[in-house]
Image: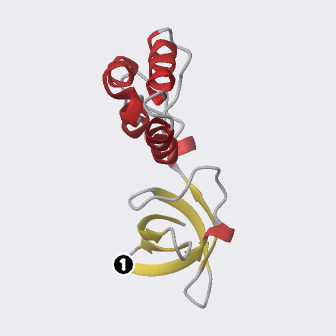
Amino acid sequence: MIGHIESYDEETQTGVIECDDKFYEFHIDEWESESSPTAGDDVDFMPEEDGSATSVGPVGAYLQDIRAVKNHYIAAVLGLVLGMVGAHRLYLGFYWLAIMQMAVTYLSGGYGVVWGFVEAVLLFTGHFHRDAKGRPLK
């Protein structure tokens, strides 16, 4: 069946899928994709009698072309201006890397600026191709 994810909780790794005004619960163990489930994603799944869902996977990957959403020039400028706090990584959806960049900048007394600058150059030259969801950059 095809439905969409109503909610997903990272802590419990469980979510709810809505399909035809019915709700099905799933656990991350039933998720069949490398990217994490997100509320609002369309999914294909197998409903079970007990109200759970198995074999849950995204349908957008094979029903439509993947569209570029984020612009690599915006990310590069953010890397140049605010790279020391990981603003470009936040923009691209790499939240943990952004937190690590903030920590490195803080703990090293400001040398995390180099990390942001290097990544800004890589973004300008086209060496970063995708955002955190795997979509290509504009």
Q: Is residue 54 above or below residue 71?
A: below
Give whichever of 108, 24 is nearer the camera: 108
Residue located beneath label 1 in the image: 21
Q: Is residue 19 above or below residue 71?
A: below
Give whichever of 8, 59 is nearer the camera: 8
Asked whether, in this view, residue 85 is left or right of residue 53, the answer is: left
Give whichever of 138, 60 is nearer the camera: 138
Residue visible at 53% across and 80% down in the picture: 25
Residue furthest front in the image = 109
Asked whether, in this view, residue 44 is left or right of residue 110, the answer is: right
The quadrant of the image that shows the C terminus is top left
Q: Is residue 69 visible?
A: no
Amino acid bearing label 1: Asp
Mark 1 crowdedness (10 Å alpha carbons): few <14, some 14-19, many ≥20: few
Q: Is residue 74 visible?
A: yes
What element does badge 1 sit on?
Answer: loop
Residue visible at 53% across and 51% down in the picture: 59
Residue furthest top in the image = 125
Residue visible at 37% across and 29% down in the picture: 70
Residue visible at 57% across and 42% down in the picture: 62
On the image, the x and y values in percent for residue 125 come to: 50, 8
What is the quadrant of residue 134 in the picture?
top right
On the image, the x and y values in percent for residue 98 come to: 45, 41
Asked whether, in this view, residue 119 is left or right of residue 33, the answer is: left
